[in-house]
Amino acid sequence: WGSPSASFAGVGASSSSALGSLGSSLGAWLGFAGAGQNHHGAHGVGALPAEAELTETYANFGVELQAWVPAIASVIDREIIEQLIRSIDESDQLWQQALAPRGWRLTTEAPRLAHQGIGSSMQELSVFDRHLPRPLCEDQSAVDRWNHRQKLEAYLIHPSFEPSQRQYVLDRLREWRHRGIVASAIRYEGRRTNDLMPTDAHILENLLIKMLNFQLDFANCFLSSGQAPPMVKHMGQSAAAYLRQVTDQSLFPRPAPHYEVVAMQKVWKIRPGSQNILAAMGILLHSLKRHSRSYQSFPQALRNAIEQVGSGIQTGQSRPFQFF
């Protein structure tokens, strides 16, 4: 991922065994957007497909995508965003109450590179701290709670952007929750503050890939940003289908990510916009369901979102899965 921030490396490194395969997938995720060119050799938004290139995709999947996209958005909203916001608020309260009697305070400010050690006499515990400092780390229950907090924080840090994104990302997620289903609240290229912040599409991309990395080695096995397919096999098999990101993420400001699906020697091109990665995920899951046993490794809630088409399955009936 180009030039990831040090704080993100800390978040990833603090993962415990409960994190599943997230840690092992960070290498691919951190390097994923570093390629300066897409597979066509074009840069930036020039890689986006023309309308004529979309005809076959929407002739084959147009009806299904109308159901898949909101269903996948609902899964992310329910399984990730709602739980993430609630858990962070509860964690804030817990740590504030625990730290105050010790003369400490919890801070969510991005780390300052200058003037370290100068400032308030009150000691601070930053959400960007990889490990608890002494004497807090002497309490194993506190260590366990802090490790869990770091898993939550990983969802707020896209590895292509600086730590200062954290509060902006959290504010965007709160707005998404307030306005309902994710897909209706996302602005594809929208940046509220400045070009140093991720687009909504980056935020959604980060949520989805981090979610999947908890369940399986998704970033290593099912993501590509160039002509070559993913190098890591899943369950001993090369990917029958995978996502390919085509916009140049080395540009400034970084363009919104754009995905297409490579499946069985065919490339399904998808319309740009806020729903792009949701549509790509729907086609990816559909392709894996038909051609790969890896499909069963994906979260049940996402599989239900695909299987509901024509079956009457409700995504809300899926078995809850812990993504933190």
Image (cartoon, rainbow, N blue to C red):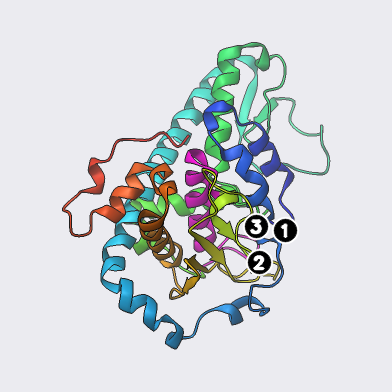
Mark toward the start of the polypeptide (3 vs 2):
3
Residue tagged 3? 32
99 relative to 277 in the view: left or right: right
- Marks 3 and 2 in Cβ contact (< 8 Å): no
Q: Position of residue 101 (x, y in %)?
A: 59, 15
Classify 170 as above or below 104. Answer: below
Residue 210 inside the magenta-drawn segment? yes
Task: Residue at 33% x, 62% y: name it.
Answer: 69
Question: In the image, what residue type sits under mark 3?
Answer: Phe
Work out which quarter of the rendered image holds the N terminus and state it: bottom right
Q: Tell me if residue 163 can be seen.
A: no
- Marks 1 and 2 in Cβ contact (< 8 Å): yes
Residue tagged 1? 2
Q: Secondary structure at mark 2?
A: loop
Disc 1 or disc 3, which is closer to the eye? 3
Classify 96 as above or below 230. Answer: above
Mark toward the start of the polypeptide (1 vs 2):
1
Give the alpha-carbon distance from disc 1 to disc 3, as whole Å. Answer: 8 Å
126 relative to 295 in the view: left or right: right
Classify 293 as above or below 184. Answer: above
Residue tagged 2? 249
Q: Position of residue 175 (x, y in %)?
A: 41, 54
Asked whether 239 or 220 is in front, the reply is 239
Q: Position of residue 271 (x, y in %)?
A: 43, 76
Q: Which residues are magenta?
A: 190-218
Please rate how many residues cluster around mark 2, counting C-alpha atoms within 10 Å: few if below 14, some from 14 to 19, many from 20: many
Give the alpha-carbon distance from disc 1 to disc 2, as whole Å. Answer: 8 Å
Q: Position of residue 14 (x, y in %)?
A: 65, 31
The image's mark for residue 230 is none
